[in-house]
Amino acid sequence: MLKFENITKIFKPEFFNQPFVALSDVSFEIPSGSMVGFLGANGAGKTTSLKIIMDFIRADKGLVTFSSELGEKRNDVFRNIGFLPERPYFYPNLTGREFLTFMGQISELSSDQIKAGIAKWASRFKIDHALERPLRTYSKGMLQRIGFLATILHEPKLIILDEPLSGLDPIGRKELKDVIVEVHREGKTVFFSSHIVPDIEEICDRVVFLKEGKLVYDGPVDKLLRSGQEIDYVIKFKTDKKINLQSTIKSHQTFPGQLHSITVTESNKKLILKELMALDVDLSGIDLIKPSLEEIFYHIKAN
Amino acid sequence: MMLDKILIISKYTFKELIKSRILYVTLIIGIALMVVTYVATEFTYGVPEKVALDFGLGMLSLSSVGISLFMGASLLFKEIDSRTVYMVISRPVPRWVFITGKITGLIFILLLNIGILTVMTLTCSYLLGGEINQAILMSILFNFLESVLLLLVVVFLSLFINNTLATIISLTVLLLGHAIKDTKNILFVQQRPYIQYVLDLYHFVLPNFYKLNLKDYVIYNQTLSLDFLLGSFAYGVCYSLFLFFMIIFLFNRKNLD
């Protein structure tokens, strides 16, 4: 659906300042029908890459190509793309409905299509009650939701989102993730940036990982999180007995109320659970410890 | 298709600006005009309609210049700063369509401002016994042309520099553009050829706003030749078109970061 080939972008600031390499020979591909996460810390070059894809800024080297299913000419391609920038503010004096109508009209939708689209999604995003209010009265989460509605209103084949979950409360994040998954199931290709690993892990099948303007990983999410790296689990249980386990554990902590928390590797998990069952402990829970962005990066670098 | 999109963008730019209460300034000026007119009837003997006309045309010019300067400078800056431009040009909307729509929307605001103040000025002048002639309407048309030209100057500058600097430089260009003709006639300048060269260069390159100022001719009932009017009108239109195409050319190449 989209090829990002050998892109280099160097920002040349004012005189006397050193040029800054934002992207260095970065290449990746977004396959049709996939849900791809764009992972990287702040300043890694994610937004710069998205701006180059959308032709807001030009690369110094390299090429962005769109597959013919999006269209041949620039206008055809952009008719099939929905883009949501990071923390958009929109026109503060327009009402929600006016803004959506404007976005629908420039996307070449008929007024019936615009009305149907608003009716379909506004209640889903819980902004139907606020559509007649000026956008300046919207909360951050509401702006993000109306922005996403405007992004999918024209039913694009490729949806590109820049940090769509930032600034949302946990419920808002969950709702937006559910809608992203829903539109993906309808056959849309989704490419969204985030610096939060669990967000990507939860809904993406592929991930592109940038670090300081360089591509460090492009492939399946599972492989990024697990390949060659031992996954740890935290097992929590209650017991009044003294614990003396045969298998190796990474750490053991005790808390008031006879609560114990032990950290074990994936390979030892089953053995330790058997031992704990034999000791007749009261099991409280098992949690997977998800690696942080930095842990993943250093692991990839080491390999 | 592209014309439709220009009209859609200009319509919503117009709506957004109207709702931002910019025209409150116009209404305040209109009310001030009526108060001044009333005062003029009490204190000016014989020519209150001229005071109303002078004040009305002056305010009309000042408010149009204000709208062009301040709204023009923030026209692109606000779009990029709030990332709204990304939403619009990520649709099947070429950059030239976007910028043309934005400028057209602001020109509609200028038209509305000038329309309201024209009606108020002419009404006040007429009620005080003044007549509405072609020269007044011509002066208002030229005033509109002046504010469009200034708008294009400020939008052009805002493509390179920040909006505050663009406003200050545009205001300077406006003032110099009005003063250039009289400055060239000063004896001090005429005696120094090198200053004349600089002024000639300025006269040739930067907009000569004095050519679009017909207010004095109207107030003092001076006659204007058709050649002068056509020449000045063509100058204003051609300079505006040149700036407009330069804006499109540069905006198409601008990095929107």
Image (cartoon, rainbow, N blue to C red):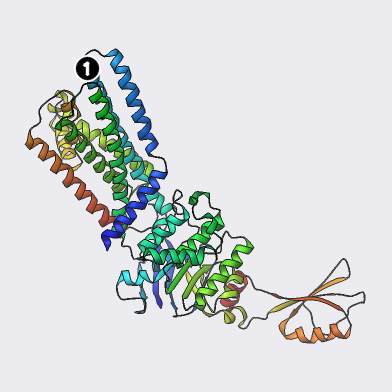
Q: Give the crowd class for mark 1: few <14, some 14-19, many >=20 residues within 10 Å.
A: some
Q: Nearer the viewer, residue B147 or B179?
A: B147
Up the image or down, A20 lies above or below B13; here it is below
Residue at 49 percent across and 79 percent down: it is: A34
Q: Position of residue B14 (x, y in %)?
A: 35, 48
Q: Is residue B70 visible?
A: yes
Q: Position of residue B163 (x, y in %)?
A: 37, 44
Q: Position of residue A252 (x, y in %)?
A: 81, 73
Quadrant of the snapshot with the C terminus of chain B: bottom left
User: Which chain does the residue under circle 1 lie in?
Assistant: B
Residue B132 in which image quadrant? top left
Q: Position of residue A28 (x, y in %)?
A: 44, 77
Residue A32 in which image quadrant? bottom left
Up the image or down, B24 lies above or below B81; here it is above
Q: Amino acid at mark 1?
A: Val
Quadrant of the snapshot with the N terminus of chain B: bottom left
Q: Is residue A45 visible?
A: no
Up the image or down, B179 lies above or below A50; here it is above
Residue at 7 percent across and 33 percent down: it is: B225
Return the residue at label 1: B47
- Left or right of B180? Residue B8 is right
Residue B131 in which image quadrant? top left
